[in-house]
Amino acid sequence: QVQLVESGGGLVQAGGSLRLSCAASGLIFTPRTMGWYRQAPGKQRELVAKMHANGTTNYVDSVKGRFTMSRDNTRSSAYLQMNTLKPEDTAVYYCNVDSFAPEGNYWGQGTQVSVSS
């Protein structure tokens, strides 16, 4: 059974930084993708960053140049370094894994990021 646990959220002033972590357990092989999504109140969940098994990473335009996704050498943990945070980055951030071993798409419980102006 795959489990994802996020951490690192919190309250920060605009211009500040946070680093989110996602610890994955139960993965047998490197997943197809590991990603970060976010959902603000009253809005749909949106993709923030997605890393493919080969390391290629895609970002939503609004975070390019400010956010950086990485993973550790075991490929079972992912991180999201968020710099120059803006109030519009306020949301619950979710870790997502698209795995083929075991097969499935998995979500963490989310971590709240709040950016004050």
Image: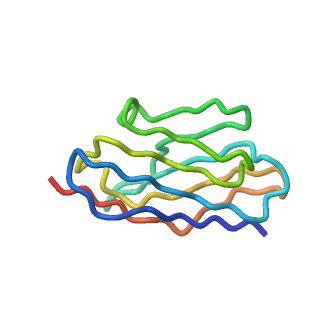
Q: Is residue 39 left or right of residue 30?
A: left
Quarter location, residue 104 = bottom right
Query: Which residue sits at x=67%, y=53%?
Result: 97
Residue at 59% across / 67% down in the picture?
Answer: 5
- Pick the front one: 46 or 17: 17
Residue 11: name its quadrant.
Answer: bottom left
**Considering only vertical position in the picture, is 47 above or below 44?**
above
- Estimate the x, y position of residue 40 in percent, counting from the top left: 34, 57
Position of 23 relative to 87 (above/below): below
Q: Is 59 above or below relative to 95? A: above
Q: Is residue 2 left or right of residue 11?
A: right
With 28 as the anchor, is 2 left or right in this view?
left
- Quarter holding the N terminus? bottom right
Q: How is the image coloured?
A: rainbow
**Farthest front residue?**
73
Q: How many marks do you count on the picture?
A: 0
Across and down, in percent, residue 70 comes to 57, 42
Residue 31: x, y in percent? 75, 47
Picture residue at 46% right of the left edge, 43% below the top = 48
Q: Is residue 116 above or below residue 35?
A: below
- Residue 108 drawn at (x, y percent): 58, 65
**In the drawing, does residue 25 fall left or right of residue 107?**
right
Q: Residue at x 19, y 57 (%)?
A: 116
> Farthest left residue?
117
Occupied quadrant, residue 22: bottom right
